[in-house]
Amino acid sequence: MTIAAEGSLLTRAAMALNEACRKADLDADGVTLLRDFANTVYHLPAERVVVRLAQANTPGKFDRLVTSVKVTRWLVEQGFPTIRPLEAKQPIVAEGFLATFWHHEEHIGPPPDPAQLGPLLRRLHDLPPVPFELPTHDPFGTVRRSILAGLALGEADRAWLLERCEALAETYYERLEFALPYGLVHGDAHRGNMIRTRDGFLLCDWDGVCAGPREIDLIPTLAGVRFGLTERQRSNFSQAYGYDATRWEGYPVLRDMRELQTLTAVLRNAHRDETAFAELRHRLDSLRAGDDRQWHPF
């Protein structure tokens, strides 16, 4: 079958989906588009499978997807509540995209609360060491590449963002002394990457999984005041995890780094999406002014 889609990127993604499903011997009848932002995500109702498409020209992306599949299979063996990859060999290269395949989980009830993420992360961080090599956490690689590739950025903003990355890396991050142990981290842990199912909560979207300081997994929620999280929600999250990273002297550094990292998906889409462009301008104006105005989630 073919999928009708508007816009050149979605058209290419639709072609990639058809090819990937053919290679994986999956039925794409009745396919629906779930999301088109950082990744293009489809649901195959006939197979009860979710297909995630990432652009293949992203440096290191193939290896990262291999790692995400390998780690989640190991997590399933450990009994950790995670989204489950299909047993098929993946990722599959198709039409300039990399496709991964995951069992579809039905979302029920209201969106998860940050306090419900805390125990999941504590459980993740308490697992035994992963019995294979993980990529090392790279706090600035992805955001630097996004800044350099951002088609909607003016040169003045691009230079300012790169200088901001450099200052945070050399002046602050490289001198931090972390309070928590080093080990397996999700890499992008926030309540938007949780699924509420009939059997409990699952953690999903493991593209950033790596080895690094455990504080990395706490910062997205604690820095969530940018996106409307209340002090009570942040406090409940810290209490549920068992450690309050806002009291650690390195917290402001990781908070400022996280704010830069949240620009990546907006930068990737601002040249083709008016809403993303407006949000990019809003966030850049806020960062350059040094204020704490709220941002809109994507």
Image (cartoon, rainbow, N blue to C red):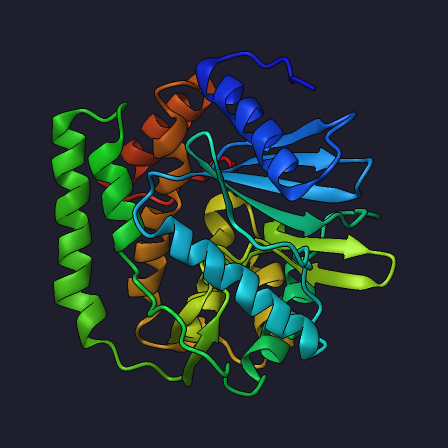
Q: Which residue occupies the extreme right position in the image?
A: 198
Horizontal side, residue 167 vs residue 122: left or right: left
At 71% from the left and 27% from the top, the residue drawn is: 32
Please provide percent x and percent y for residue 140. 26, 55
Q: Nearer the viewer, residue 121 or 16?
A: 16
Which quadrant of the figure has residue 276? top left
At 62% from the left and 60% from the top, the residue drawn is: 233
1 lies above or below 26: above
At 40% from the left and 73% from the top, the residue drawn is: 211
Residue 235 in sight: no
Q: Nearer the viewer, residue 117 or 137?
A: 137
Quadrant, the N terminus: top right
Please provide percent x and percent y for residue 24. 64, 43
Residue 156 in sight: yes
Q: How many marks?
A: 0
At 27% from the left and 30% from the top, the residue drawn is: 150
284 lies above or below 253: above
Which quadrant of the figure has residue 154? top left
Please provide percent x and percent y for residue 266. 40, 33
Horizontal side, residue 251 vs residue 10: left or right: left
Horizontal side, residue 38 vs residue 153: left or right: right
Q: Nearer the viewer, residue 289 or 169?
A: 169
Please provide percent x and percent y for residue 236. 63, 68
